[in-house]
Image: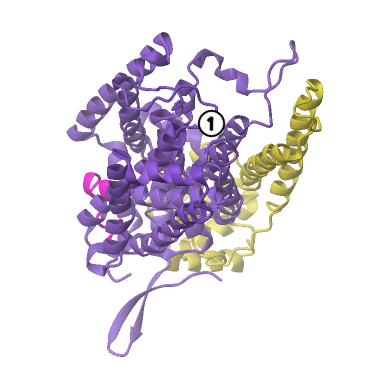
Chain colours: A purple, B yellow
Amino acid sequence: MQERVPLTEREVNRDLLRPVFTTPLWWWAAVGVLSVAVAAGLGSALYLAINGFGVTGYNRPVMWAFLLVNFVFWVGISHAGIMLSAILRLTQAEWRRPATRAAEVLTIFSLLTAAQMPLWHVGRVWRIYWVFPYDFGRGIWPNVRSPLIWDPSAIFTYLTSTILFVYIAMLPDIAVIRDRATGWRQGFYGVLAMGWRGTPRQWHLQAVSGILLSAIILPIFVSVHSIVSWDFGVAVAVEGWHATVFAPYFVIGAVWSGVAGVITLMALMRWLFKAEKYIRAEHFDGLGKLLSVVGIGWWFFTLMEIIFSLYSKEAAEVSFRTLQMFTWPYNMLFILFFLTGFVFPVTLFLSRTVRHNIAAMFWISIFVNIGMWLERYMIIVPGLMRKQGLTFTWGSYSPGATETILVGSTFAMVALGLLIFSKFFPLIPLSDAKEGEVLRHEIQVGKVKVPAIIREA
Amino acid sequence: MADTSILGLFSNVDTAVVGADKLKEAGFEDFEVLTGSPYPEGAFGEKPVKHKLFVFPLIGAVCGFTVGMLLTAGTQMAYPMVTGGKPILSLPPMAIITYEGTMLGAVLFTIIGVIFESRLPRPRLGLYDRRITEGFIGLMVTSSEQRIGRAEQALKDAKATEIKSSARAGA
């Protein structure tokens, strides 16, 4: 905590609400560019919906490719967001303060983005409502035995819980905006703040609910990515997918990529919103340490997955791994995945100098997610491509322009969502920052004064 | 006769604590503290907070479990198609969806509980000052017009920066 600068409540309000009350030129430019990218993605999606999957690079038997790779990727990003927030809240980690809101909001936008991928993937998007139990007239109900029904129920639970969690945690901050806003915004934030006044009772309930909701959402987080992994794991016919290790493997992979996503976001927030006083090198140091452990853990599962599948020397498994690791172009992608997803980040995260270098942390976090996107690609596409007994046609997959634009636009969509959110609500929680100031203390040790944090038992 | 409220504003914690002590000395135990930051419990000598928030997620979980179970069992029974000679009710997927329902119920009821126990929503803010979210600390007392003068005097003795009254504000 050596880098902390003492701040008053007024300074915290001024600094953290600046993006809400002022709109710099770069914000408009970024929103404009991202909107164009999102519009391009929407155009691609509509083109796909109107013309069917013939316009993509999808080819039998590779009928799950870019869109579902991207689905798993964004679900993964969403998971570590709330996981990070929940674990740091539960453990009362002091360095959580600037990270929690960004992590939670990243969860919301990446989940919304992830959820639209199956929407386009089903082809007949206008029939997506079939996943809901609605048909009282005809008596036809969703097949609850299908993992494709488990997914929506899990994602709906997770998304609803996260939105409500973020809203409740944001109440004190909304009240601060209400007290500073004028015109229609005062009314808008007044309604959202629900009459928050900051009584000890309200603050106490905030603290308790933060811990209670974290404790409830953590098991949801584990369940959601486990269920996503079972989309693959319960598929008996695909050797590369049918593995019992998939649930924990996917969960820890989600933590790895999601926390890296939080680092990317925090670095951008520090630079764009000039939040140097709040997002400091020590926060990146903490996240880097956490990630070095998570990265090694994730790689352990990756190795387990490969070793156990090869140990039995079953022809189908050997054939799949040969395709995945030694056949062009997947061998090149596998090496890229191995280097960007594991070797570079984990090695670099072990260095304190790197962990304190925010630009380096930013780029490494991007590398992690390039690696993790490739990991999902390497599971899904070669997994389906392998020649199987009853398959009468064997195509390969090379991405077409339609789904490439659509997938590319999802990155713009998440960024746009975060930018627009930052215009209405602070991405760094004011109440958490203020609590950190209230509990800040200095203790004399010998001839030096050392910053310390006092905390309630 | 209607009660009157007064709100004393203090610029820092130390003077607010003096104000709280003076109010107690004057016989006002049920004053409200309004702050823009979460202070440790009891910092102003206020009474400990009692709540029943922990009951809410339990009720929600039971409701969610019931809905999840009824939904999964009901829809399978409503369209009883035997596949592969297996039982109509397939427990593993029922457990998954019921689990999600249980957790969703727990979260929804926790949120309801937080709002209810926080005494929200409050349609009118009442006696309040925007400076509270800027670092000022408010001590609010509601009492009869005969007694409120003593509370006001206590806040003045504690050197409150400003004292606002609901009567003066016309609230």
Residue B151: quadrant of the picture? bottom right
Residue bounds of the magenta highlight = A265-280
Residue A87, compared with residue A119, is above or below; it is: below
Q: Amino acid at mark 1?
A: Gly
Q: Is residue A281 magenta?
A: no
Residue toward you, A123 or A61: A61
A270 falls in the magenta region: yes
Q: Is residue A453 above or below residue A215?
A: below
**A400 with respect to A298 (left or right):** left
Q: Quadrant of the C terminus of chain A?
A: bottom right
Q: Nearer the viewer, residue A116 or A368?
A: A368
**Where's residue B169, x and y in %?**
49, 39
Q: Residues within 10 Å of mark 1 (few under 14, many from 20)?
A: few
User: What kind of element bears circle 1?
Assistant: loop
Q: Which x, y percent locates residue A64?
A: 45, 29
- x 22%, y 67%: residue: A353
- Left or right of B143? Residue B21 is left
Q: Where does the image place residue A299, in percent across and percent down from the top left? A: 41, 57
Q: Position of residue A386 (x, y in %)?
A: 44, 35
Q: Is residue A262 visible?
A: yes
Chain under label 1? A
In the foreground, A241 or A20:
A241
Locate residue A176 relative to residue B123 in the image: left or right.
left
Total labels: the figure holds 1
Residue A172 visible, this orientation:
no
Mark 1 lies on residue:
A389
Q: Residue furthest left?
A: A25
Query: Which residue does the image show at 39% across and 62% down from the upper left?
Result: A95
